[in-house]
């Protein structure tokens, strides 16, 4: 006779809603073949309610933390947790999803009947990642990762009209599975070294026992870092990113990139800092190395790109490096702030790409953006803000984010990393500026008026947050500061 | 009375401003009269303010106008003592005469008011210089004088030569100022202030002779620039490009005397450094001879005068260098009279000849313009140093003093004597060439006597040139008594007492003068070809003199051209290529790094796999190695 | 003793299968090699008392998954033999290098430090504790791991939806 | 006699390595994919062996999930391969290298 | 009040931005009118400013507690002149931009934002805040150069942006380090200048941080050999851009050296004097020499800036009262004169559409007023006594002599060279006969343009003859900086030979 498992509905409410939403979308589509806006409603309601529950979770987690009891925050016998960190990351994911759906709406519509599946996959992917960021168990984390990743593989290949999309899909898929295998083998080795899958247990184990022959654990850590580094496209595990970003449907890339980054880094932070914090003397230098490599390689390569999406991809590599400095600094709040800010800016930027190059745009050569300031001043202006935000110019949230992680890294004793980081961010300026130059200082190629569609709202949010959090970061900083993991 | 002293400067300055903004609304010569009135008024004020000094024994006062740069003890303050008073009177007195003369001379020039603006400003600047109560303010006037000379020399800016000459004048002066400024810095470092009161009273106890020498020499550099001494005299001849009244103003009353004045003013410092003084004297003597030799061979009526000015200034330097400050100032004053007279006369001639300046194209003008001829004749005799004219007394005192100083100075005395001879020669040569002999001018020229507004100043100056010297004869040294208070800190050099000595020396210099004049007369009375032949006998020396030893070319080749070349190298090779190139090079380097790293992204998924696995292995090995 | 023999035999066949997968020119052979490996590993599961897992391995993997593979291989074309020559420059060299690095590293590790594969291993192995009967597996699966179990549902949904959406495009075209 | 767990672990590692290398050596998407299956199997073997050595049943439980993941990956992966094959009638990934640089 | 000073331009920018784009004729006038309000406020600030060492009108609001960053602004004698200068030059340069016809609105907006950033940077007392403004300035300036500039505007703009950003990136690292050490020492994080001055660093650390700050500011100044972005930026930038760039932006560098390097790293500053002085002197001479042969009038003025700013740096690191006063007041002077010179070049360009000296000649004939102003400004910049340039340079030179005699002597040659390049340029451009007929048809300055230049000219004369009203306000602050250095280090300010100060004071009485 099996005892009834412990169920904590609130802990999984958002994910559950997302799953149900996905199912609903599929069923509604199959049953009634409704027009797109009906699906829009379903998705909208799903996301809004999911966000609502996430907020609810936030307060519960916050109260629990205030009360100092950890039990309410550990759910499903330790498979997942509902700590501030998880909930914050989840909210970031949901926000990115909501914006991503809006940004990609045109594309979804263009898919016709298959749009429903696309939406379902988006919701499921988010559900998976949202489980992943909350996972307190490496296997659970792996599952969440796979749920999200597999959905993304499909999304990458969705635009069947373009061969690049196939290529993106297969590359993403093969390398992704390769990385997952690495990751899960690493998990297995860590298990072999600690007899634990649970992150908190691992921390306890490593805290209490000295492992005499920890080599196997280190191998495991290495593989885990590699697997997660792939997801966040940190060098040298970044190679997929440019090709996928370029090949995948413009409408969805922003979403794909954003959620992968958020979930991946949430996982990295949890695994490395929480679970393996006691071994940091060993992995800190490695992570620092990866961070430095990512920053430099990413910015240097972005400098020479002719295609905006590849540029953003490589800049994403650089950003992975920047966030890694936060990991080196061991600061959850700095990482979360950066993630939230960057995710939104990423979705916003790709929304622009989707508008300019079309939802399923073939290429996105930077030259297509000539004189965008003339064609559509608002679009150019918002894109400029986002680019500068990602560049980390003061008065944008990006600067606060960078400043946060750099400070932590410096305090953490990795001064050289901060030096590298600031130099890299200068190079980063160079290529972001290039785009702005093209938009403002070249003459327009054609005067076709661009209609933003739902992307309008995405940009409004992205630009708004970029500036507001750039000038009054306190609100978000304080939230991030409260979003501590168990 | 001193509370109105600021008016001395304010009046010409106000005049300048007035004319600058409203000059164009004033009819005809009115603006000229205004300007002259302003200077004349400050002359009157000067006289009144100077009254106390005539009783003698009255010390200087310092009047603070307002704070300027207190951190370096430099305020706008007026220092009113006999020396300043004398200079003021010379500047305003001669100045006002020149103003009046200019009314006639510049008649009909379309920028007539603007010209007087500058003249007034010039006077104001010079007065600032002489009335300054500290070196900083002196430097203020010093530089403003330079500015005005720039503006006035380049007055006819549409011609190519004047602007170039103006620029040359200012820049050469700047080179002098460079030394002067460093001198001031030393002064400041030594005393913590630049004010006369602060410096002179403490010079004795606070200045090592070394510093004193340095300061003295540096001030000399500045003075040499302003007063056109070797090696910085080259700007002065070119300054002839300006309208003649300007030349008169620059040469006689104002600018060039500044150098002499500042050395006299700094007597307290030179007191401590015989070396510097000797250098000053030597420079003066050499310049005197050098310039005189050039003046001999000039054809341009104004260039003769220019080089004669340089030569005469050399005398003054010789005097102040010999610490015969009174003698120097005395000669400054008399020279102001007759040199102004000479220039105005020359101006009147040029005016009459329709801007003809080549003396070979003149001659026999005395019938056409008797007054000019007469007055210039007086001046010529005066500068030639024939008693009892002004030049005789001052020059003689200088020579006597330097002789009395003995040693090296007696050598300088000989130079001075030779110079005196040359001076007499070239001056008489000039006068003869212009006024005597056969008319050699073209038909186009219709020489005529200048209007009264021009001749009256000539006459006044002529009178001054005659009697001016009597203020300080070996028999009545009233000027010396007058200046006493300004030099009480220093021991003045005096000519030897005693009749015999005086007679001997005076006799010698008079003899030199007479010989010079005589040769000049006899040579140039004769028809053209004859004295041409005379000049040719001196070839090639004469040619070299005529080309002023080709110093300008030399400077051009040795300084200007290489300098320009350096600048070009710096600008187009070093800056554009090297520095900017390396800056852009860094940028290119980063880009090329990117280009170099790009092939990593081959597009083949299996290559990516290799990269991935390789990265993983590195990470793993690093971890294991690091952990072990 | 039995276990030792089984380990050796099955280990070798598993490796052999794996190598086949890699080297066989025809996908079919690769598939067969994989099949062999799967079976051998399944046996090793049984040896280690992971009965249920072994069963699932055989049924799901050898059964379902491999069938799918074979189906696709057929569809893609059996005759498509992959030529042995490598187009990508240096690919083999690099792979060889990596393999070499791994082997050397392994050698170093075994030689230098006595490398412990399972540091957390118990001193005495209690067979019952890991006797993978259905009961034994089901209990944790449906209590502690229930959420993970549910999560697999998402996975399968995605697989289904993904397969559909990817396969659907023909209709989209027409 | 009981075979020491290290042997199993080593065997698994070997399988994993072979899978990984095969992934890099073959250009047929299907075969690459099988290699991934090999790697996952190696992982499973590791988990079971380690679990047994540590008297922990969870190792076996984890294997289940990995099996599911593998299955799901297979489905999607094959779908992608099929889709591509329909377009270009080849399963060689080397031909998919338009995106680069 | 200071906050208002920063917010007003932003508000003005917003207002202008809200004006519909088609009403292009009112953007510029509106901008000018609105930019008068900060000017008025700055004037009032100058009026109420009491000569005292302490920061005044201080406003402090916590920004984010845990990071210890705050909206912390205040003004003292060092920043006051720059604030006033900024507020004064923005309306002028806007009014001088009537030639800008395309995208006027954006232009006005950027200029106003630039003003806000500049004023903010000068007022900031919190290093974080300072950095924010310091960086934020780049964007509007970048657009101003890049959109309304000449042919190679993009190259110039990008170069300007990246070069400066590089410098400030290093500074950011240094700021972080500084705050970190402060946290380590005092247990609470703070970026406030007033807190950080107390942090005592190891010699090594102090030198590194000094270097980081110094490089950032040296690029901004720009100090040789970091100057090459300046000529490009100037030549390409539109008139208003050049004016603000030369007059105010560059001063951020000198201001930063004076405000941050000296007070934050006294020991390192004292040790670095030889280096900084050497660079400054090289800059003075080199800039002047290079300026002599520039074929482009604007480039000539640009290099003259390099030369002149060298004086400021020299004065700063002379560490004497005279030197510091000179540096601060020269900050202002150079802003006025060079700003005016760029205005004049712009006016020439608007008429003749060329900046090449060779294309001009004899302009004094056709445009005497412009020529007059140009000559006036040239002499101000040459350092003619009675005009402002002299006060600054003379104070710097004389003041620095006691500590750095050798350097000063070398620097003084710059005074000669300045005369050479400016007067030669004047000769070539304005004198002679207007032989080219496109030159002979040019029109002289309009009353509007005269109105723009007149106030500058007036200020130049006033400062030249009565700098007291500035020095009174400046001196307490500079003295405070000196005192700080003296009691932080073993540095002794050489007292130029004074028997007793009574005499020195006695002169003026």
Image: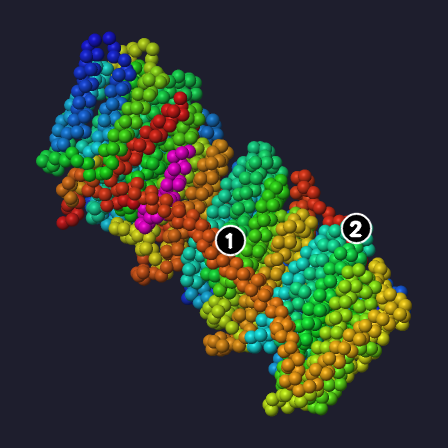
Tell which of B97 and C49 is nearer to you: B97
Magenta residue span = A288-314
Q: What's the CA distance linking mark 1 and mark 2?
A: 44 Å
Q: Is residue E334 magenta?
A: no
* Mark 1 neighbour class, 10 Å CA radius: few under 14, some 14 to 19, many 20 or more: many
Given the image, what chain letter belongs to the residue carrying mark 1? E
Q: Which residue is under mark 1?
A: E227
Q: Quadrant of the C terminus of chain E?
A: bottom right
Q: Which element type, helix, strand or loop, lies under badge 1?
A: loop
* Mark 2 neighbour class, 10 Å CA radius: few under 14, some 14 to 19, many 20 or more: some
Whether residue B465 sits left or right of residue A152 in the image: it is right
Given the image, what chain letter belongs to the residue carrying mark 2? B
Q: Which residue is under mark 2?
A: B206
Using the image, determine if residue A281 lies above or below residue A19: above
The quadrant holding residue B122 is bottom right
Q: Which element type, helix, strand or loop, lies under badge 2?
A: helix
x, y percentage for residue B228? 68, 67
- Would residue E482 be seen by someone viewing this image from the given angle? yes
- Magenta-drawn stretch, dominant element (helix, strand or loop): helix
x, y percentage for residue B283? 71, 63
Q: Hey, which residue is sitting farthest front in the picture? A: B537
Q: Are marks 1 and 2 in contact (CB under 8 Å)?
A: no
Label drawn at residue B438: none
Q: Is residue A308 magenta?
A: yes
Q: Please give the name of the residue rendered at 22% of the width and 18% of the height, measured from the top-left corner.
A: C45
Q: Please give the name of the residue rendered at 67% of the width and 51% of the height, measured from the top-left corner.
A: E401
What is the total number of numbered labels drawn onto the structure image? 2
x, y percentage for residue E60? 59, 45
């Amino acid at each position: 006779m099996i005892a009834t498992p412990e169920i904590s509905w609130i802990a999984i409410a958002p994910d559950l809603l997302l799953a149900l939403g996905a199912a609903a979308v599929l069923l509604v589509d199959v049953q009634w073949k409704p027009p797109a806006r009906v699906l829009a409603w379903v998705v909208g309601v799903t996301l809004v309610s999911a966000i609502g529950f996430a907020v609810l979770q936030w307060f519960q987690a916050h109260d629990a933390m205030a009360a100092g009891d950890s039990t309410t925050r550990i759910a499903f016998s330790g498979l997942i947790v509902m700590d501030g960190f998880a909930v914050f990351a989840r909210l970031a994911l949901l926000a990115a999803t909501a914006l991503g759906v809006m940004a990609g709406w045109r594309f979804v519509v263009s898919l016709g009947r298959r749009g429903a599946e696309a939406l379902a996959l988006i919701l499921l992917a988010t559900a998976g990642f949202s489980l992943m960021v909350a996972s307190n168990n490496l296997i659970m984390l792996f599952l969440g990762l796979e749920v999200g990743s597999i959905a993304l593989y499909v999304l990458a290949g969705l635009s069947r009209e373009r061969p690049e999309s196939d290529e993106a899909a297969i590359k993403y898929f093969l390398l992704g599975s390769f990385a997952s295998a690495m990751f899960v083998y690493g998990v297995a080795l860590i298990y072999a070294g600690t007899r634990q899958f649970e992150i908190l247990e691992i921390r306890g184990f490593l805290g209490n026992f000295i492992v005499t022959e920890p080599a196997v654990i280190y191998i495991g850590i290495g593989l885990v870092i590699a697997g997660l580094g792939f997801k966040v496209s940190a060098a040298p595990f970044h190679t997929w990113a440019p090709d996928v970003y370029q090949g995948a449907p413009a409408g969805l890339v922003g979403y794909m990139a954003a959620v992968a980054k958020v979930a991946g880094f949430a996982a990295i932070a949890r695994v490395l800092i929480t679970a393996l914090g006691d071994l940091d003397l060993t992995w800190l230098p490695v992570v620092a190395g990866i961070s430095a490599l990512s920053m430099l390689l990413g910015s240097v390569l972005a400098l020479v790109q002719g295609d905006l999406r590849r540029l953003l991809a490589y800049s994403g590599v650089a950003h992975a490096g920047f966030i890694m400095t936060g990991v080196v600094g061991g600061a959850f709040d700095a990482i979360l702030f950066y993630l939230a800010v960057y995710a939104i800016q990423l979705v916003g930027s790709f929304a622009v790409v989707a508008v300019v190059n079309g939802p399923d745009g073939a290429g996105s050569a930077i030259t297509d953006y000539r004189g965008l300031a003339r064609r559509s001043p608002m679009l150019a202006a918002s894109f400029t803000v986002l680019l500068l935000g990602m560049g980390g110019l003061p008065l944008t949230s990006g600067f606060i984010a960078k400043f946060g992680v750099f400070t932590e890294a410096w305090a953490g004793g990795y001064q050289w990393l901060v030096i590298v980081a600031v130099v890299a961010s200068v190079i980063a300026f160079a290529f972001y500026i290039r785009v702005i130059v093209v938009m403002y200082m070249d003459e327009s190629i054609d005067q076709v008026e661009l209609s933003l569609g739902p992307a309008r709202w995405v940009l409004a949010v992205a630009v708004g947050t970029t500036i507001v959090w750039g000038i009054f970061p306190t609100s978000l900083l304080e939230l991030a500061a409260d979003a501590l993991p168990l | 009375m001193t509370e109105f002293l600021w008016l001395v400067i304010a009046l010409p300055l106000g005049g300048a401003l007035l004319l600058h903004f409203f000059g164009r609304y004033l009819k005809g010569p009115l603006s000229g009269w205004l300007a002259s009135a302003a200077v004349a008024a400050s002359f009157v004020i000067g006289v009144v303010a100077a009254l106390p000094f005539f009783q003698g024994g009255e010390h200087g006062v310092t009047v603070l106008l307002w704070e300027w740069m207190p951190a370096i003890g430099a305020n706008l303050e007026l220092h009113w003592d006999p020396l300043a008073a004398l200079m003021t009177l010379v500047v305003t007195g001669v100045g006002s005469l020149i103003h009046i003369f200019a009314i006639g001379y510049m008649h009909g020039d379309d920028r007539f008011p603007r010209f007087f603006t500058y003249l007034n400003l010039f006077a104001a600047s010079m007065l600032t210089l002489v009335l300054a109560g500290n070196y900083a303010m002196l430097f203020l006037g010093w530089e403003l004088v330079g500015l005005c000379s720039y503006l006035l020399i380049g007055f006819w800016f549409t011609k190519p030569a004047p602007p170039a000459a103006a620029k040359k004048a200012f820049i050469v002066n700047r080179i002098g100022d460079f030394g002067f400024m460093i001198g001031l810095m030393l002064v400041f470092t030594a005393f913590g202030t630049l004010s006369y009161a602060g410096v002179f009273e403490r010079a004795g106890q606070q200045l090592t002779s070394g510093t004193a020498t340095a300061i003295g020499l540096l001030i000399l550099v500045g003075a040499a620039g302003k007063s056109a001494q070797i090696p910085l005299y080259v700007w002065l001849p070119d300054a002839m490009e300006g309208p003649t009244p300007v030349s008169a103003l620059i040469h006689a009353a104002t600018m060039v005397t500044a150098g002499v004045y500042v050395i006299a003013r700094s007597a307290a410092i030179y007191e401590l450094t015989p070396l510097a003084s000797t250098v000053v004297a030597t420079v003066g003597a050499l310049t005197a001879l050098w310039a005189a030799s050039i003046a001999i061979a000039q054809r341009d009526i104004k260039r003769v005068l220019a080089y004669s000015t340089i030569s005469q200034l050399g005398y003054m330097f010789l005097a102040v260098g010999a610490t015969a400050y009174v003698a120097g100032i005395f000669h400054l004053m008399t020279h102001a009279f007759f040199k102004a007279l000479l220039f105005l006369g020359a101006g009147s001639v040029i005016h009459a000849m329709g801007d003809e300046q080549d003396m070979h194209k003149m001659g026999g003008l005395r019938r056409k313009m008797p007054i000019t001829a007469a007055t210039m004749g007086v001046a010529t005799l005066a500068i030639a140093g024939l008693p009892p004219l002004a030049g005789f007394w001052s020059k003689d005192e200088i020579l006597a003093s330097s002789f009395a100083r003995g040693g090296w100075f007696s050598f300088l005395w000989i130079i001075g004597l030779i110079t005196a001879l040359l001076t007499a020669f070239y001056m008489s040569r000039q006068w003869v060439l212009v006024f005597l002999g056969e008319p050699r001018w073209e038909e186009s020229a219709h020489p005529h006597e200048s209007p009264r507004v021009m001749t009256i100043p000539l006459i006044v100056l002529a009178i001054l040139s005659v009697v001016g010297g009597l203020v300080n004869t070996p028999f009545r040294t009233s000027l010396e008594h007058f200046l006493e208070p300004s030099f009480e800190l220093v021991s003045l050099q005096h000519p030897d007492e005693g009749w015999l000595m005086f007679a001997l020396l005076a006799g010698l210099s008079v003899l030199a003068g007479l010989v010079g004049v005589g040769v000049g007369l006899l040579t140039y009375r004769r028809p053209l070809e004859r004295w041409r032949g005379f000049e040719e006998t001196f070839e090639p020396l004469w040619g070299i003199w005529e080309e002023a030893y080709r110093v300008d070319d030399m400077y051009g080749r040795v300084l200007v051209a290489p300098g320009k070349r350096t600048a070009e190298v710096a600008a187009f090779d070093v800056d554009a290529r090297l520095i900017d190139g390396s800056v852009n090079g860094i940028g290119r380097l980063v880009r090329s790094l990117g280009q170099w790293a790009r092939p990593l992204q081959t597009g083949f998924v299996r290559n990516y796999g290799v990269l991935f696995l390789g990265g993983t292995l590195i990470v793993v090995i690093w971890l294991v190695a690091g952990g072990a | 003793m039995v276990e030792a023999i089984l380990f050796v035999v099955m280990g070798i066949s598993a490796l052999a299968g794996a190598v086949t997968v890699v080297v066989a020119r025809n996908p079919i052979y690769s598939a067969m090699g994989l099949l062999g490996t799967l079976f051998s590993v399944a046996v090793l599961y049984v040896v280690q008392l992971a009965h249920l897992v072994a069963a699932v391995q055989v049924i799901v993997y050898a059964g379902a998954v491999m069938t799918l593979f074979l189906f696709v291989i057929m569809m893609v074309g059996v005759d498509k033999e992959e030529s042995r020559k490598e187009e990508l420059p240096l690919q083999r060299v690099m792979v060889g290098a990596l393999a070499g690095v791994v082997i050397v590293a392994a050698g170093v590790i075994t030689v230098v430090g006595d490398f412990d594969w399972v540091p957390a291993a118990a001193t005495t192995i209690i067979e019952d504790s890991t006797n993978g009967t259905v009961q034994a597996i089901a209990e944790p699966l449906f209590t502690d791991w229930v959420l993970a179990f549910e999560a697999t549902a998402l996975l399968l949904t995605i697989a289904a939806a993904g397969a559909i959406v990817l396969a659907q495009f023909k209709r989209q075209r027409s | 006699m009981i075979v020491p767990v290290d042997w199993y672990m080593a065997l698994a590692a070997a399988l994993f390595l072979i899978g990984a290398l095969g992934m890099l050596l073959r250009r047929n998407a299907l075969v690459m994919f099988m290699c991934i299956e090999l790697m996952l199997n190696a992982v499973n073997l590791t988990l079971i062996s380690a679990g047994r050595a540590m008297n922990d049943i969870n190792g076996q439980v984890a294997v289940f999930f990995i099996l599911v993941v593998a299955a799901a990956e297979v489905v999607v992966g094959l779908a992608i391969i099929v889709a591509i094959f329909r377009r270009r009638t080849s399963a060689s990934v080397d031909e998919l290298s338009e995106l680069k640089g | 009040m200071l906050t208002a000073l920063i917010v007003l331009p932003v508000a003005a920018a917003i207002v202008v931005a809200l004006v519909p784009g088609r009403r292009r004729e009112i953007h510029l006038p509106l901008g000018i009118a609105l930019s008068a309000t900060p000017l008025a406020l700055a004037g009032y600030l100058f009026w109420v400013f009491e000569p005292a060492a302490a920061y005044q009108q201080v406003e402090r609001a916590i920004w984010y507690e845990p990071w210890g960053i705050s909206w912390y602004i205040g003004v003292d004698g060092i920043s006051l002149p720059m604030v006033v200068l900024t507020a004064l030059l923005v309306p002028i340069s806007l009014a001088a931009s009537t030639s800008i016809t395309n995208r006027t609105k954006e232009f006005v907006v950027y200029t106003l934002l630039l003003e806000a950033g500049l004023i903010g940077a000068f007022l900031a007392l919190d290093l974080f805040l300072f950095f924010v403004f310091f960086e934020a300035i780049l964007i509007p300036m970048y657009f101003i150069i890049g959109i309304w500039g000449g042919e190679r505007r993009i190259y110039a703009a990008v170069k300007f942006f990246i070069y400066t950003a590089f410098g400030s990136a290093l500074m950011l690292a240094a700021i972080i380090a500084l705050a970190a050490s402060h946290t380590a020492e005092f247990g609470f994080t703070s970026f406030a200048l007033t807190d950080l001055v107390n942090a005592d660093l190891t010699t090594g650390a102090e030198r590194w941080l000094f270097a980081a700050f110094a490089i950032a500011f040296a690029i901004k100044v720009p100090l040789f050999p970091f100057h090459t972005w300046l000529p490009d930026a100037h030549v390409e930038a539109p008139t208003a851009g050049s004016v603000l760039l030369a007059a105010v932006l560059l001063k951020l560098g000198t201001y930063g050296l004076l405000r941050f390097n000296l007070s934050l790293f006294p020991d390192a500053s004292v040790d670095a004097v030889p280096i900084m002085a050497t660079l400054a002197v090289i800059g003075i001479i080199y800039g002047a020499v290079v300026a002599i042969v520039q074929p482009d009038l604007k480039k000539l003025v640009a290099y003259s800036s390099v030369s002149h700013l060298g004086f400021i740096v020299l004065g700063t690191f002379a560490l004497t009262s005279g030197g510091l006063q000179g540096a601060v007041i020269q900050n202002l002077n150079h802003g006025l004169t060079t700003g005016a010179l760029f205005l004049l070049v712009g006016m020439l360009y608007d008429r003749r559409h060329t900046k090449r000296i060779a294309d001009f000649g004899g302009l004094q004939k056709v445009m005497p007023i412009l020529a007059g102003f140009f000559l006036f400004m040239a002499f101000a910049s040459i350092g003619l006594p009675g005009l402002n340039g002299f006060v600054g340079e003379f104070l710097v030179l004389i003041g620095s002599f006691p500590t750095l005699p050798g350097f000063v002597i070398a620097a003084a040659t710059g005074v000669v060279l300045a005369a050479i390049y400016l007067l030669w340029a004047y000769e070539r451009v304005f004198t002679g006969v207007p032989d080219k007929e496109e030159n002979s048809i040019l029109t002289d300055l309009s009353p509007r343009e005269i109105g723009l230049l007149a106030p500058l000219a007036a200020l130049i004369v006033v400062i030249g003859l009565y700098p007291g009203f500035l020095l009174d306000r400046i001196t307490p602050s500079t003295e405070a900086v000196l005192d700080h250095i003296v009691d932080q280090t073993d540095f002794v300010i050489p007292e130029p030979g004074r028997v007793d100060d009574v005499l020195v004071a006695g002169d003026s009485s």
